[in-house]
Amino acid sequence: MKKLLGIISLSILLTSCDKWLDVNNNPNSATTDVPTPELRLPPLIAQFCDGYESSGTRVAFITQQLGVTFANNNNWNLTRWLSNVSSANWPWQNWYVNTAVNVAPLIAAAEETQAWHYIGAAKVIKAWGFANLADFYGMLPYAEFNDPSTYTPKFDDASYVQEQILLLLDEAIADLKKPQGPAAPALAKGDILNGGNVDNWIRLAYGLKARYMNHTTKKADYNPQAVLDMLANAPQTDAQSSVMQYVDEGPTVTNTAKEALQYTNTGLTARFTKLYIDYLTNNYTGAPSGANNVADPRIIYIIPRMATQSGTLVLAQGVDMASELPKTGPLAYTYNATTNTFNNKDSVYVMLRKTPYAPTPGQRIQSTGSWYTRRGAKALLLTNAEMRFIEAEVKLRQNKPAEALAAYQAGIRSHMNLMGIRTDTINTFMSSTSIVQDAATLTLSHIMIQKYIAMSFSPEIWADMRRMNYCADAAGNYNEATGIYKGFKRPSHVFAEAYPAATDWPRRFAVPSYEINYNIAQVLKANPNAASPTYLKEAVWWDKP
């Protein structure tokens, strides 16, 4: 990694030698003040979102939100809990090469005009990116990552990284609260995430602190009240959420930079799973039910539908990951407009992209698409909904079921609001027996399954599943009675070399090939088992007592 950066830096230096007489700032060459902070922040946010959301796509395959058409490729391997070279590399490469190295130059440029809000935002991004990778990989270079004299940086354990990012978030909050210098650009000029709303950035920082502090529920020093203290300053309304809005420029635009990451990442091969659809339809052990059941209105927004030959829209079937199907299917399918038929029966597992993009009258709808995978989708990066589910979990742990119930219901409502569902539709569902109405019957499983839905395509789902131990008991065996994520089973095509026992579950991502190839001594010094397949089942620091 560092060697690559050194080569890039050297090439920039050599190509600049013939301009040594130019004493003025070259607008085409980066210095501490060119580009200015408002020009540096947008690509920093965009690159961060690419890596973060790409982590989320990978998590969607691991946590069985997504299956994939059979092709024995990277995504299919992820569904069997194998993170191979390609799937492991991109979040790492995107962070270190495209994003993290640009934080310090932004801060240096912002210091020239005392643009404290830019400095605060940059520190939030730095903390967020490192925290995401630490939870994903379990160990990574942090202390030495940006040292130009170190080509083989040491690996720090994720526990150390968390200590550092919590301190960094405190610094960010302090910077964001400072008044800007008189010549500083307004944050709105460069903020493509929160539109220049400084309060949203402050709440984002507190929300991240609540998120990461709550990861430690298995540790003896877990402090639920400290989590609640952070939540008090985190997003309290949907408008205070940090949401990335992508732009749909249509199918004929060749530049795809503005389209949603999940649209790009899921492509035509991703399919929703039976587990995911079961959670949305309350088809799991212990799901709330009663005389006043109402279908979850999110279903038709999230789960794609396909028209029958007669034109009736039917909901996609979900891929059962515990069945034999993932070993050889489902198969990709094609549509024949002349015969108005699909070429195989696996068309019942409907693709996630809207097809046709703009149907004409009488044209058969092959897929209505999914809210999360539209070209102009929203990325729910840190939301009021997430904060309410964290609050519900903490309150239930504190034996305050009434307060936990209120937060659980607020989290569901918030997610529906963020999706743009009509208020009267939300109210009907929220008053139904399809969600828990009695505090005495609320369980941690109810809370976490609703959080799983509300945080679709988020890396946080995997963090939650690991610390909740999936649907397993204390010994690691699948247990429908005591497990949290009801119905989450080992896939039929599980990568047996990494998970040989029935009690083995995915706990971390593989070390990327860059580090294996060029920094292997430091990798093995940090964990001698890092090159072994069973490394994938080793718990990260907060995932063990």
Image: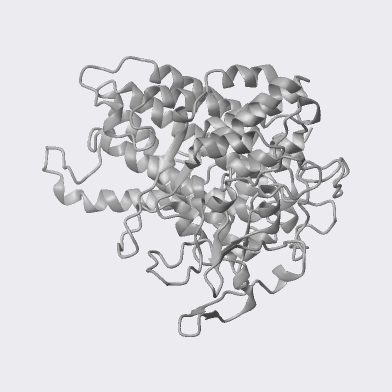
Q: Is residue 510 left or right of residue 268?
A: right
Q: Is residue 362 left or right of residue 394?
A: left
Q: Is residue 55 something that shows in the picture?
A: yes
In front: 387, or 120? 387
Q: How many marks?
A: 0
Q: Is residue 515 something that shows in the picture?
A: no
Please tell me which residue is depicted at 65% across the width and 63% down the height of the picture. 317
The single residue placed furthest to the bottom in the displayed view is 339
Please tell me which residue is depicted at 59% across the width and 41% down the height of the picture. 454
Quarter assignment of residue 360: bottom left
Image coordinates of residue 148 in percent, x first then y, are 42, 40
Residue 431 lies, with reference to residue 272, above or below; the image says above
Quarter assignment of residue 244: top left
Residue 160 lies, with reference to residue 6, above or below; the image says above
Q: How is the image coloured?
A: one colour
Image coordinates of residue 512 in percent, x first then y, are 57, 54
In front: 439, or 508? 439
In front: 44, or 341? 341
Image coordinates of residue 423 in percent, x first then y, are 51, 35
Name the quarter where the C terminus is drawn: top right
Q: Is residue 416 left or right of residue 171?
A: right
Residue 448 lies, with reference to residue 356, above or below; the image says above
Quarter assignment of residue 149: top left
Image coordinates of residue 388 in percent, x first then y, are 61, 28
